[in-house]
Amino acid sequence: MSVEAMDELVRQVAEKVGVSEDKARVAVETVVNFLKEKLPAPLAAHVDTALGAAAPAIANLDVGSLAGSLGGLFGKK
């Protein structure tokens, strides 16, 4: 993931969730690492590239909706 994409995602998470940028950075890094660990190796190898390419879309990311979707994916309602 590019530094710019990571910084933008961290800023968005901090702003939308209402936490410090330090806490948001930990959350973002945790999610990225989780994806890398859980995805099949051929896909995991592309996580950073995909997130870097998605940098323009990150500005329009609905973090609340994404969090809800991920919660459902992992069995939470």
Image (cartoon, rainbow, N blue to C red):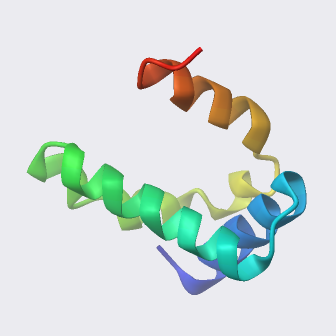
x and y, in percent, of residue 40 in the image: 13, 43
- Determine whether 72 is above or below 60 in the image: above
Where is residue 67, by image quadrant? top right
Determine the residue positioned at 89% across, 62% down: 15
Q: Residue at point 66% right, 81% down?
A: 4
Residue in view at x 21 percent, y 54 percent: 37
Q: Residue at x 44, y 63 (%)?
A: 30
Residue 30 in view here: yes
Q: How far across and how far down the image is residue 45, in percent?
A: 21, 61
Above or below residue 10? Residue 12 is above
Residue 32 vs residue 18, the one in the foreground: 18
Quadrant of the snapshot with the C terminus: top right
Horizontal arrangement in the rendering, residue 5 relative to residue 74 (left or right): right
- The quadrant holding residue 74 is top left
Residue 24 location in percent, x, y?
68, 69
Position of residue 71 in the picture relative to residue 44 (left or right): right
